[in-house]
Structure formats: C-alpha cells, structure tokens
Image (cartoon, rainbow, N blue to C red):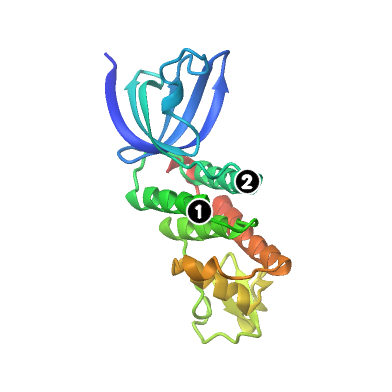
Amino acid sequence: MSLQYKTQGFVFKKDDRLESDRNFSVFTRDFGRIEVLGKSIRKIASKLRGGIEIFSFSEVEFVQGRMRKTLTDAVLEKKFNNIDTPEKLKVSYHISSLLDDFLKGEEKDEKILHLIEDVFNKLENYKKENCSIVYYYFLWNFIALLGYSPELSQCAVCQQKLNPYNLYFSNKEGGVICKHCSVSRKGAVKIKSDIIKIMRLILKKDFDVLSRLKIDKNANDSLSKISEGYKNYILSTNNFKNI
C-alpha cells in the first residue's frame, strides 16, 4: 500500500524523463531533500503542470511507492517573477548546483529553507546588472549553516591578530592565516583585506551595505577564486553522498 504525504518546499532542479515525465528535486520543510516524479506533467493537459516550477515554492502531495515518490498534486505558493534575466538565471542555477552538491539526503533544516527564500527575495529585487554578490551571499551563509564557517577575525592556526597587509586564505585550515603560518601551509593563497571585509559583511548578513558596494572585476575575480576553492575543498574532503 502506498503512503501519501503533503509538504511545502523549494524546487531547485528538474530533469525530463521519457516522453512527458519530469523529476523534481525539492528541498522540503518536513523531509529535507526529496526527489518526486511528475507523471505526464509535460503534457499540456496535465493538471499538475502549473503547480510546480523550478526556482519556486510549492505545496506538493506525493505517494511513496517501493521505488520512488510520485507527485499527485501541486499548488504554486511563491514564484519569483523577476529572476528571468540572463545574469539572475545564472545565479539561480549556481545556487541550484550548490544545493544539488551538498544536500544529498532527507534531512530537514528550517534555517536552510529560510536562507533560500531570503536569497531569492534579494535576487528578485536586486537592481544592479552584476548580481554575483547575491550568489556569494548564499554560498558563504549556506556553508556556515552546514558547519564550515571560515575563521576571518584572527589567524586560523596561531589565533594571533591579523596583519591586514599579509593575509592568506587556507582551505585546509578553514580560514584566514598570517604570513608566518602560511609558510608551512601548502595551498594557502594571498588575499587582500578588502575581500576579507566583504566576506565578513556577508556572514554578518549585512546585505544593505553589500548591495551598495562597488566591487571591481579584480575584487570579484578574487572573491570567486576564494569562494569556489573553499566550496570545492569541502566537497572533496567530506562525504556528502550519505548525508
């Protein structure tokens, strides 16, 4: 006998199956990440078609079979209408990739769900053409919620006060380290104090200040390098397949 469930969640990924089916990855309030199959949902006449969309919140009903969850009903609760520009869609898919990489099992987390909603609200209302800061805001706060918040206030190795002119970031040590400690730490990369300040603002969730900053290409490239490097290090050294 199949069991039926109802929950709310954010749809962050979709994959077309066969001729008219579609699988949805949803981070839900009650079950964490679930995979739910919409049978024949790509057909124009499907009653489920308008109730579930990528990058939106929906109330979903599904039956749990022996092999999979099958969608039986869906009601669209919150759609972010103003994220259809190329730059905003790029950020949305980067966030989707993060969720897909890190959220591998049915483990609920209300704080992550709130962060997702908060960030997509910010993305929808963001006025600048380059909105990559919204992605970094999500990435660092998401990583922090997972328990990997970087040390930014003192040397992550010796705990001494940081010299703003000799800063290094070490993925292995989990944050900023001083010049002395960087000598014996392979892979540590030099980082400017301005980037550290941006990261501190991100983790303080001071988005009003962040949104007013003028971040030039060099600073953006540096922030990207540090962010992606730390993310990839965490993925490669921790087993997220079984979470």
Would you identify the image quadrant in which residue 193 lies? bottom right
* Quarter the N terminus occupies: top left
Residue depicted at 44% across the width and 25% down the height? 50
Q: Residue furthest right?
A: 218
Q: Which mark is residue 90?
A: 2
**192 vs 54: above or below:** below
Tell me, yes or no, whether the two marked residues, 1 and 2, touch with CB atoms within 8 Å.
no
In terms of secondary structure, where does tag 2 sit?
helix
Q: Position of residue 188 (x, y in %)?
A: 66, 70
Q: Which mark is residue 125?
A: 1
Question: How much space separates mark 1 and mark 2, taking CA atoms?
Answer: 15 Å
Would you identify the image quadrant in which residue 217 lies? bottom right
Q: Position of residue 26 (x, y in %)?
A: 43, 35
Q: Nearer the viewer, residue 199 or 79?
A: 79
Residue depicted at 61% across the width and 71% down the height? 169
**242 vs 202: above or below:** above
Crowding at mark 2 (Cα within 10 Å: few <14, some 14-19, many 20+): some
